[in-house]
Amino acid sequence: MPFCGKCGKEVRKESKFCPHCGAQIKSAVVQHPPIIAQPPLPSQTRTQKLKDILFKRKLIAIPIIIVVSFIGLYFYAHWSFNNTVTDIMSTIEFIDFRLEDLSLLPPSATLIMTCSVYNPSNNPVTLSMDVEFYIENEYITSIKADDEIIQSKGKSAIDLRILLGSNAIDKIASIDFNNARIKIKGTLTAKSNIFFIPVKAVQQYEEIW
C-alpha cells in the first residue's frame, strides 16, 4: 500500500491528492512510511541537561582550584622562609676582627668583622646586613654588608667592612676588643626562591658579645 510522502498515512494507489493532508501525490509514491525523528524522551533531556551543568561547573572549578592552590603555596613559601631566616640568624657567629687600610693622613682605617653563617635550608639564600656598630653602648658607625650567597646546607663567611674616620679611631683606639662589650644592631635581609616563588624576609638583628 502506498503512503503519502508528507504525512506518511496510507493513500489509494490511484489518488492524486492525500485525503488526510491534501498534499499532491506524485508519481513516485513512497512505498513505506517515512521515518520521522522522534523527540527525545523527557528523562533523556534531563540527563543531558544535568551533564551540561556538571561540565560547566567543572570548567569554572578548575581555574578556581588552581588560583587557590597558588595562593596557598605563596603564603606557605613566605611562612616557611621566615622560619628559615630565623634559624639562619641563630647560627651567626663573629669569628674575627682585623684592621686594614690604615692611614695616618688623614687618620682612617677599615675594621673588618667576619662572621660565619650556616644555611640549613635546601635552597641557596642571599643575605645582606644593614646594622649599627656599638662599643660599650657607644655608637661608633653604621655597617652595611653587601649580598652574600649562602649555599643550601652550607656554611659561609660574611665580612662586615666598617670604615673608620678619625673620630671613630679615637673612640676605639684604647679599647681592648677581647674584653669590651660590642653590639651589632640593625636589620638582616634574606632572599631566595621556594617552589619557583621569589621570597624575601627582613628581620631585626641584634648581637652582643
Image (cartoon, grey):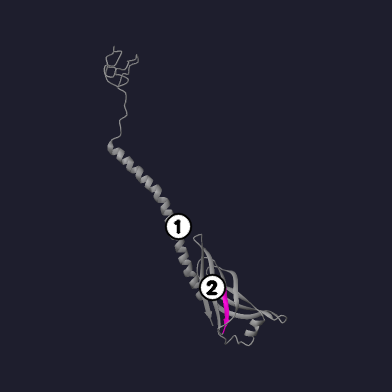
What type is the residue that disc 1 sits on? Phe
* Quarter the N terminus occupies: top left
Residue type, numbered disc 2: Thr
Q: Is residue 87 magenta?
A: no
In the visual, does 84 lie left or right of 170?
left
- Which percent across, then down, holds residue 179? 57, 87
The range drawn in magenta is: 130-135
Asked which secondary structure carries label 2, the reply is strand
Q: Position of residue 123 (x, y in %)?
A: 52, 65
Q: Quadrant of residue 41?
A: top left
Of residue 170 and residue 9, the one placed in the foreground of this image is 170
Residue appearing at x 35%, y 44% in the figure: 53
- Depicted 206 relative to depicted 68: above or below: below
Residue 172 visible in the snapshot: no
Residue 173 vertical position relative to residue 190 in the rendered view, above or below: below
Q: Main secondary structure of the magenta part?
A: strand
Judge left or right: residue 92 versus residue 168: left
Q: Which residue is mark 1?
A: 70
Q: Which residue is mark 2?
A: 187
